[in-house]
Image: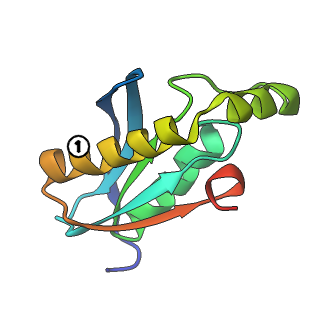
Amino acid sequence: MKSGATWMNAESLNLSTSSGATSAYVTRPHEPVSAAVILIQEYWGINEHIRDLAGRYAKEGYLCIAPDLYRGRVAADSKEASALMQALPIEDGMEIIRKAMDATEETYQIKNFAITGYCMGGT
């Protein structure tokens, strides 16, 4: 990928799962891309830091999609973050990630994926 690409926009992609609706935060560069990075959130949720990281991937030339595992909730403090993380069934989280990949392939014609995460999403 071309380093230093400019990203065109950030948008929301709606996802439907067996446990209900959620969304994913998407950033993409101006140039057509053939690969996407799935960015798994920290235990805080899809906050400003995750949106910033998604923008950085787009600036490097990748479509970046951050599935919202908490369905719109963002923790205000570590106690709430811990409770949200503990309440997330692993099967639900995995389904949301799979649905995000499916929607990315269908919406953006992307077939090549990498996945990364931080905190809850990486350890």
Q: Could you tell whether 49 is left or right of 16 in the image? A: right
Indicate the quadrant containing the C terminus: top left, top right, bottom left or bottom right: bottom right
- Name the quadrant containing residue 114: bottom left
Residue 33 seen from this side: yes
Q: Could you tell whether 74 is left or right of 112 in the image? A: right
Residue drawn where x is 53% and y is 45% of the image: 51
* Residue 56 coordinates in the image, percent (x, y): 50, 61
Which residue in the structure is indicated by mark 1? 103
- Name the quadrant containing residue 117: bottom right
Camera-nearest residue between 103 and 90: 90
Judged from the image, the secondary structure of the residue bearing numbered disc 1 is helix
Query: What colouring style does the render use?
Result: rainbow
User: Which residue in the rendered view is the most extreme toward the bottom?
Assistant: 2
Three-letter code, disc 1 = Ala
Residue 9 seen from this side: no
Question: Taking 40 as reference, is 82 above or below it?
Answer: above
Camera-nearest residue between 105 and 12: 105
Q: Residues within 10 Å of mark 1 (few under 14, many from 20)?
A: some
- Name the quadrant containing residue 16: top left
Residue drawn where x is 50% and y is 24% of the image: 71
* Residue 98 coordinates in the image, percent (x, y): 34, 48
* Residue 1 coordinates in the image, percent (x, y): 31, 80
Question: Taking 19 as reference, is 36 above or below it?
Answer: below
Residue drawn where x is 49% and y is 55% of the image: 39
Q: For the image shown, how many numbered marks are present on the structure? A: 1
* Residue 80 coordinates in the image, percent (x, y): 80, 25
